[in-house]
Amino acid sequence: MNDGADRRLLALLCGDVVGYSRLLAADEDGAIRQLAQRRELVSTLIVAYDGRLVDFAGDNFLAEFSSVVRAVNCALAIQHTIALETRRAEVDRRMQFRIGAHVGEVRIEGDRLFGDTVNIVARLEGAAEAGGICLSQQTLEQVSRLVKNQVRTRWISPGKAGRRLAI
């Protein structure tokens, strides 16, 4: 069916700050300042891995990549960099993301993305642990096939929710 919409196979990342409301309640100015720093970091890393930041609304971001390996490596870089930056902060003041990763066909209208792939990656993000990455089975299979054990991580299988990536 040709509905005139642009459709592409893309790898998507969706990230969200864990406990952002709690951080705002504890220190609104500090949380807003820290989120601005995280936005800059995330944006810079997405571009460095040849991705495009689709949206960064509130404490949530969506990014697209033409390469599943670049998408997963970007997610790893985001989580690793944030972990290094926050390791000295008090545990209850750390701003951590959880990230979902999925690859699939996306409908593109202007700068916006639509379709099941977008919905799935958002659900995977919700299944990730603080500081972690949750991959769909499809994403895991593609990354595993392409990099053949070159990624030094632990894969944790939580069942049907996807695969979580521990760094």
Image: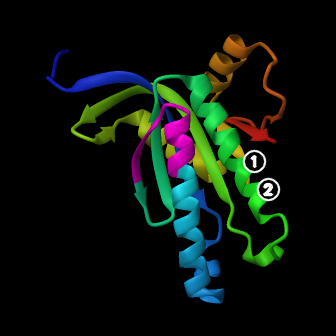
User: Does 137 sit above or below residue 135?
Assistant: above
Q: Residue furthest left?
A: 4
Q: Position of residue 44 (x, y in %)?
A: 53, 47
Q: Which residue is mark 2?
A: 84
Q: Which stretch appears magenta?
A: 43-55
Going by the numbered disc 2, the residue's amino acid type is Leu
Please state, as top left, top right, bottom left or bottom right, where the C terminus lies in the image.
top right
Q: Which residue is mark 1?
A: 80
**Number of numbered callouts drawn:** 2
Q: Is residue 129 visible?
A: no
Location of the N terminus by quadrant is top left
What's under tag 1, amino acid-wise?
His
Tag 2's secondary structure?
A: helix
SS for tag 1?
Answer: helix
Residue 116 position in % (x across, y down):
41, 35
Residue 153: image quadrant is top right
Depth check, front residue: 103 or 66: 66
Depth check, front residue: 74 or 121: 74
Q: Where in the figure is residue 86, as x and y percent of width and height?
A: 77, 65
Of residues 134 and 162, the one drawn nearer to the viewer in this rendering: 134
Residue 54 drawn in magenta:
yes
